[in-house]
Amino acid sequence: MGILSRTSYVIRSKINAILDRTEDPTQTLDYSYEQMRDQLQQVKRGIADLTTQKKRLEMQKRRLEENVEKHNGQARTAVQQDREDLARRALEKKKAKMNQIEELERQISDLQSQQDRLIEQKNDLQTRIEEFRTRKETMKARYEAAEASSTVSEAMTATGEEFEDVGRAIERAEERTEDMEARAAALDELHDTGAFDDVFSDKDSIDRELESLSADSGVDAELETLKSELGEGESESEPVEDAEEDVDLDDLEAEVADEDVETELAELQEEER
């Protein structure tokens, strides 16, 4: 499994773990993006380490190449001085160094191939991260818009329910107001008819009817008394002259009228008591 494949697998695993632990997708996307950036940084550090190793091998190769030149010069000098044995030893060292150089060149070539592959994978991962960032921002904007729309819808729904409650409260208030108005009108009507007097009295309907009959009887008795008094007055005044009879009759009528008024006034006062 390559570095990019392992990186993708780790990223997917962490994303799935985060999705299981969180409920806010925007936080999940931000976290995933940061994790991908961390993975990219690790890949870059790996490339840097690989490049460092390659540079070390190249420096070692240059030192060996310098030794090869040195041993080659030593061999030439030994031959010129007829020291074949020294020339042979110098050439043997030169050959050993050249073998090491060949091995280093293979290692450097392998490291270069790995470096090129990692750089390509790094560029691919970086492109994917940028694409993910774009999609992340788009998804965050869509989620926030959807969340705002949902919040508004929930608020409108709650407002509708509250309006329903307010409407029912207004209906109950209107019904209670109408009941109170009807009760007030009924009390006014009872007050006008004198029902409250009956309510506060300890007399029943029979007592009140008897009192009414008694009052009527008293009026009738007073009327009969007045009639009898008037009859006696007329019998005593018969010998008087006609002119005097007219005057006395007028005075009598006035007196009778005054007595009627006084009697009625007394009755009214009795009824008020």
Image (tube, rainbow, N blue to C red):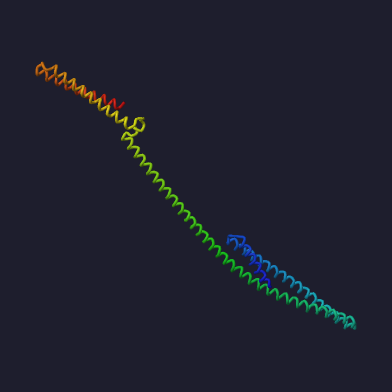
Quadrant in the picture for the N terminus: bottom right
Q: Work out which residue is located at the far left of the displayed protein and give it.
A: 242
Residue 16 pos. (x, y %): 62, 65
Horizontally, residue 168 falls left or right of residue 93, namely: left
Q: At which x and y percent is residue 158?
A: 48, 54
Q: Is residue 145 left or right of residue 210?
A: right
Q: Residue at x 23, y 26 (%)?
A: 220
In percent of the image, x 80 and y 76: which residue is there?
Answer: 64
Taking 66 as reference, is 240 above or below it?
A: above
Considering the image in quadrants, where does the C terminus appear? top left
Query: 73 or 216: which is nearer to us?
Result: 216
Vertical relation: 167 (above or below) 45: above
Q: Position of residue 45 (x, y in %)?
A: 70, 67
Q: Is residue 29 above or below residue 118?
A: above
**Residue nearest the observer in this picture, 33 or 67:** 33
Circle count: 0
In percent of width and height, residue 192 lies at: 31, 35
**Quick check: 23 above or below 55?**
above
Answer left or right for 69 relative to 191.
right
Foreground of the two, 211 or 138: 211
The part of the image, by quadrant, that contains residue 205 is top left
Q: Which quarter of the figure has residue 90?
A: bottom right
Q: Nearer the viewer, residue 51 or 189?
A: 189
